[in-house]
Amino acid sequence: MDKPSAVQSLTDTMARFTAYIGKHLPTDVEKKLAELRTLETKPLAKAIYLSMAQNQDAAARLDRPSCQDTGVIQYFITAGARFPLLGELADVLAEATAEATRRAPLRHNAVETFVEKNTGTNTGTRAPWLDWEIVPDDDGVTIDAYMAGGGCTLPGRATVLMPGQGYEGVTDFVFDVISTRGVNACPPLLVGVGVSTAVETAARLSKKALMRPVGSHHADPSAAKMETLLEDGLNELGIGPQGLTGSASVMGVNIESSARHPSTIGVAVSTGCWAHRRGRIRVNADLSYEILSHEGAQL
Amino acid sequence: MSRRVLTTPIRDEDLEDLRAGDVVYLTGHIVTCRDVAHRRLIELGRELPVDLAGGAIFHAGPIVRRLADGGHEMVSIGPTTSMRMEKFEREFIERTGVKLIVGKGGMGPLTEEGCRTHKAVHAIFPGGCAVLAATQVEAIERAEWTDLGMPETLWVCRVRELGPLIVSIDTHGNNLIERNKLEFNAKKSAIVERIHAQVGFIR
């Protein structure tokens, strides 16, 4: 394949994949929601879970975005240093976003700041938002595409704690964000926590944490234990679907971390709504691909 | 149990016995109305191009498809965070005579006061269930203030049994989500304390 054809082919794949994830939830999220629905006992909460399931069925049947807020598209890219279209990838993803916006169709969600005009294409200055990690000795690329609506973006918070506040302070911060601001963010939520040095490093990790599957754990045993403690504790609050009370509050808590400065603990919380529309695709050097997040997906 | 259905135009007496936590459905008309529409009416003093007396508004920014005949199809319409409209809503209710506000999550004391004084209710449509809601929209009859772009345009929708709508603020000053938040906060400190005892990783 010559380069222009290759670029066209990858753009087409990514446009179809981006449209697809707005209409179908990933398998891990579907399974977790089914489990929470089974465990729920309150009649109102059960009715909400029923509406959620009916909605996902209707979205698939009618081929429509399951939630009207299809977000500002984000791509978390883990690129092999030898991926043949590495230099073209940013432009490919912008064009794929514009194409998905026309085809799906997606809501027009990119408002140029200060100009305060909606571009109408979901592309604009640094939109779609790209996050890069380069890995050596690989000629493929793995991309997490994510649509976060405004509702589950609003609770996002980051701060820098003093070391004396410790992981106890991290716990307080997570609980404060979820119990006050998470209620309106379409629970049951997937909670991403970043523990690091500064606000921006913690914030990035908290979003990366949302790319990890529901039910997965941090490699460090203490961090994994803290994920479980926070998940169980937040569920005890009984926020329920849509904050209307129920037996669960969250789909899970995922923590991502980095080594930190000894004088600070940067902590951030990002939330994913129940309609956690993310997808992971692996594209090989020959541009063949595999969808890793959605079992049985057909683009 | 039969469904409780409100029909526009809604009268004060239709709302009198509704209580926070009740579930209703709406048949008739509902107009999408969110951030900028509220700002234009309240802060910029512009007249709304739609008569909302006895009517319903939807805090929502939908996905709409333009049809070949010049009409519009509702593709996907779900509620947006109502709290963003809190600073405008009391005056909005007073100025427009709107009776039903549909959105997501709770609203605050200003809306509570507006609902009590002018007999209106706020109700929650399950967030994220936007295709479910779209299938309950029979037609988009008009589009106003289209200069605001797709999410902020006032889409005048004819709906049939739109719901479930969970009453979150009733005409008597009850506020379901605020009550729930108090409940969550009351439980919080004991849970957090228990976790504190297990996360002393800095030694």
Image (cartoon, coloured by chain):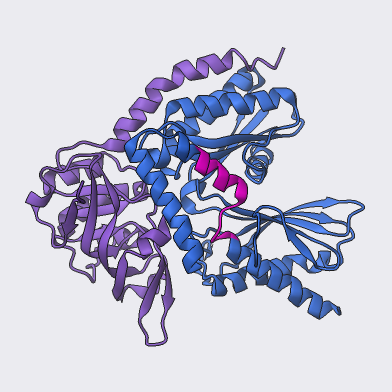
Q: Quadrant of the N terminus of chain A?
A: bottom right
Q: Position of residue B94 (x, y in %)?
A: 16, 53
Magenta span of residues: A21-35
- Identify whether A241 is placed above or below B92: above
Question: Picture quarter containing residue B157?
Answer: bottom left
Q: At 37% from the left edge and 85% from the top edge, which residue is drawn?
A: B70
Q: Position of residue B31 (x, y in %)?
A: 27, 65
The residue furthest right is A137
Q: Colour of chain B?
A: purple
Q: Colour of chain A?
A: blue
- Identify whether A284 is placed above or below A195: below
The number of callouts visible is 0
Q: Position of residue B52 (x, y in %)?
A: 18, 63
Q: Quadrant of the C terminus of chain A?
A: bottom right
Left or right placement of residue B27 versus residue A173 in this view:
left
Does the magenta segment cover residue A231? no
Q: At 7% from the left edge and 50% from the top edge, which residue is drawn?
A: B13
Left or right placement of residue A152 versus residue A126 in this view:
left
Q: Position of residue A274 (x, y in %)?
A: 50, 46
Front-most of residues B177 and A214: A214
Residue B29 visible to an observer of this rendering: yes
Q: At 39% from the left edge and 59% from the top edge, which residue is drawn?
A: B132
Q: At 67% from the left edge and 52% from the top edge, which residue is drawn?
A: A293
Residue A161 visible to an observer of this rendering: no
